[in-house]
Amino acid sequence: MRVLVVSQEEIGRLLPMSECMTAMAEALGTLARGAALLPLRQVLVLPGGQGAFAVMPACLEAPPALGLKAITVFPGNHGTAFDSHQGAVLLFEMEHGSLRAVMDASAITAIRTAAVSGVATRLLARPDAGDLAILGTGVQAASHLEAMLLARSIRRVRAWSRRPESVARFAERARRRHGGLGRGGGERAGGGGGSGPRLHRHLRAGAGPAGRVDCSGSARERRRVLATGRSRAGHGSGGAVPLLCRPAPVGAQRGR
């Protein structure tokens, strides 16, 4: 039996964000109905803390599918020719367990993670939410911006990073890809450390009672920032924290 091999470039063309959001909504519904098996990922932290190796299996009843994502996570790859997340997604057919496809995991991870956030935002954010803040300017920041633009009518986008030059690059890429984004002071760079209790306070102040936060970042940092108490909290990775709020009253916009 032939095995289909799908490259990173091909996935970007074959899996548009809008279609992935539709697929993720269906998959989440299947999981909620108990018609999917989705155990927690197994993560092997490499000696010296240079990276990690993670394995994520899943089984879906309808449509019948059996799959596995295996990735390496090497944060030191940022700024190099290598992605921080690399690996493959394996797809098997359910009748005989035969391997049917091998797909690049970097592209799927970038699109799928943001697609789930987009679905959640579409269902859970206030209808009038339109101010978007993105903490982080990496791959997940770009894909989450695309998902949020599909989930809500966004009036303003602000980005934060420890490095001002990263914010400037992110803003320029976003303007090229999403031509409707203006230049009215939408990008801001933060200084100093941005994790732990200080970031927690920023998130709480920025979201307020009307805000919604999607966390996609370091598992360790996410546990420190927003502990949900659910069994899956702290078991993801990505690199961005999108924050979507309704307009604040006059005089309360600072920090949103």
Image (cartoon, rainbow, N blue to C red):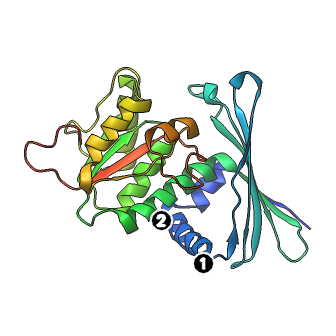
> At x 32% / y 36%, what residue is drawn?
201
Res 133 → quadrant: top left
- Which tag, 2 or 1, sits closer to the chain's start? 2
Answer yes or no: is residue 159 visible: no
> Image point 91% across, 74% down: which residue?
96
Split into 4 quadrants, where in the image is the N terminus?
A: bottom right
84 versus 157 height, above or below: above
How crowded pointer 1 is (Cα within 10 Å; few <14, some 14-19, many 20+) is rated as few
* Number of the front mark, 2 or 1: 1
Q: Position of residue 212 (x, y in %)?
A: 34, 54
Q: Position of residue 250 (x, y in %)?
A: 7, 47
Please provide percent x and percent y for residue 92.
82, 66
Q: Quadrant of the C terminus?
A: top left
**Disc on res. 138:** none
> On the picture, is 127 further left or further right than 142?
left
Residue at disc 2, secondary structure: helix
Q: Residue at x 43, y 36 (%)?
A: 136
Q: Where residue 123 appears, x then y in whole percent?
A: 39, 68
As drawn, the residue found furthest toward the front would be 229
Instruction: Measure the alpha-carbon separation of dots 2 and 1.
Output: 23 Å
Amino acid at pointer 2: Ser
Q: Quadrant of residue 137?
A: top left
Name the amino acid, label 1: Arg
The residue beneath circle 2 is: 18
Residue identified by numbered label 1: 33
